[in-house]
Image (cartoon, rainbow, N blue to C red):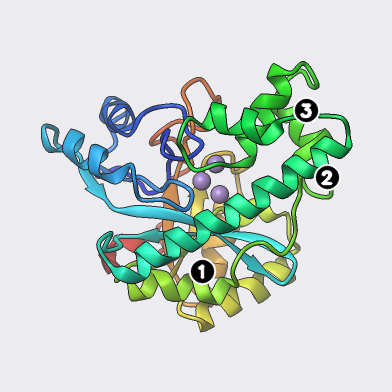
Amino acid sequence: MTVYDLHCHSTASDGRLAPAEVVARAVEQGVDVLALTDHDTVIGLKEAQDAAKSTELRLITGIEFSSQWGKRGIHIVGLNVDVDSLVLKEAVLSQFEARQRRSEMIAQRLAKLGIERALEGAKAIAAGAVLGRPHFAQYLVDQGRVKNINEAFKKYLGAGKPGDVKNIWPELSEVVGWIRSAGGVAVLAHPSKYKMTRTKLCALVSDFSECGGQAMEVSSGLMPPGVSASLARIAQDYELHASCGSDFHFPGHKWQELGQFSPMPSTCRPVWELF
Ligand code: MN
Ligand code: MN
Ligand code: MN
């Protein structure tokens, strides 16, 4: 059976393995088809493609965009996108600028709490990668403000905390439009992570589908058992294809390893039918 992992990260965003290392690890873990989906960038894809050439692994181009639906942050994965498309290049640039604005705001808010130089610190940790909250979290750990990354999110960066900057991302429909214009498949990422009621989630899926979204992840790392079946039913109700991926960021995480997630229910129409 072909193993698909269509969601993972490298050092191009907030992952800890270089793109080539992600590919090598995916091969070790028995993955046959991998999509590298770094946050708001496709910069790691070239290295991953080169690394995949000497292996049996098939690499799919990918990206994970941050978007906004009402007041909520929603992640949309674009699979099989044309990385040379002008729309995608402009999208990546505009997300970079949004992240820049957000990072400055996070740093200002942390400064008000007496935490200085957070922007410089987070940038040094990111080392040229797409800047995200995990880099700020690491800075807070390094400064001895918190014990670990989890605590950094709980106290400073997570939902409702000072680092939770609102209204920074483009509308869900705009992001879906970018992906479709770049020839890709738009996938609603990790739906169970948003902690919505089923009614709310169905409203999201309905809007997503109406603006051109084609698939949703029904199996993902960190997903409690039993959730896949319920998500598969929603996918079916809204005539969406189903995707699966580990959302791998670094080795050693108990529930997020390449190729590791519950199997997709057999009733699903797999997203790779659309590639
Ligand atoms: Mn991430
Ligand atoms: Mn995500
Ligand atoms: Mn992700």
Report how far apart the C-alphas of labels 1 and 2 lie in the structure.
Answer: 35 Å
The amino acid marked with disc number 2 is Pro
Amino acid residing under circle 3: Glu
Give residue 117's position: percent from left, percent from top: 72, 30
Report the residue marked by disc 2.
Answer: 162
Q: In front here: 216 or 267?
A: 216
Vertical order, 39 against 147 (above or below): below
Badge 1 is on which residue? 235
Element at badge 3?
A: helix
* Total numbered labels: 3
| Numbered disc in front, either 1 or 2 | 2
Q: Residue at (50%, 63%) from the top-left corner?
A: 94
Residue 208 location (% of width, % of height): 55, 75
C-beta proximity under 8 Å, tags 1 and 3: no
Q: Using residue 196 as the reference point, say whether residue 65 is left or right of it.
A: left
Query: Where does label 3 land, which residue?
Result: 151
